[in-house]
Image: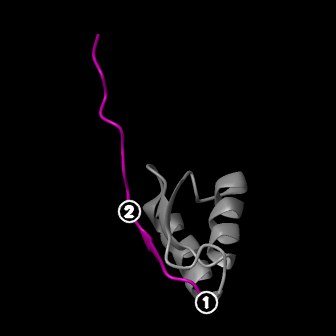
Amino acid sequence: MKRLQGKVAIVTGANRGIGRGVAMSLAAEGADIIVNDRAHPEVSQEVVEAIIQAGAQAMAYQLTWPSVRR
């Protein structure tokens, strides 16, 4: 059994660079991944497909933080 089997990780900024590396590493350890990037949902889907091809479960979800007016 992998260390993170049965866990879910939400990775923000997962479309490239460090975020993508973190998502892939967590998936390799058995975690199911929610890929988040607020600006590029099409790239998020590419990351999801890479995670699934690596044998883990993943889904893309576009979360944005509401603007705060002061």
In the picture, measured across the screen, residue 36 lies left or right of residue 54, that is: left
Q: Label 1 amino acid?
A: Gly
Q: Residue at x 27, y 16 (%)?
A: 69
Q: Residue 33: image x %, image y %?
A: 51, 70
The residue shown at (43%, 49%) is 38
Q: Is residue 61 above or below residue 6?
A: above
Residue in the image at 66% along x and 57% along y: 16
Q: CA distance from mark 1 to mark 2?
A: 19 Å
Q: Of the residues under marks 1 and 2, which one precedes in the sequence?
A: 1
Prevailing secondary structure class for the magenta stretch in the rendered image: loop
Most foreground residue, 57 or 2: 2
At mark 1, the secondary structure is: loop
> Where's residue 22, x and y in %?
67, 60
Q: Quadrant of the C terminus?
A: top left
Pointer 1: what residue? Answer: 55
Indicate which label's residue lies in the foreground, 1 or 2.
1
Q: Image check: 24 left or right of 57?
A: right
Residue annotated with mark 2: 61
Question: How many residues crowd mark 1 within 10 Å: few (<14), some (14–19), many (20+)?
Answer: few
| 9, 20: nearer the viewer | 9
Label 2 is placed on what type of residue? Answer: Tyr
Residue 27 falls within the magenta-colored stretch? no
> Compared to 56, does 37 lie above or below?
above
Q: Residues within 10 Å of mark 2 (few under 14, many from 20)?
A: some
- Residues in magenta, as a range: 56-70
Residue 11 — which label? Answer: none
Q: Secondary structure at mark 2?
A: loop
Scheme of image coloration: one colour
* 36 relative to 29 in the view: left or right: left
Q: Quadrant of the N terminus?
A: bottom right
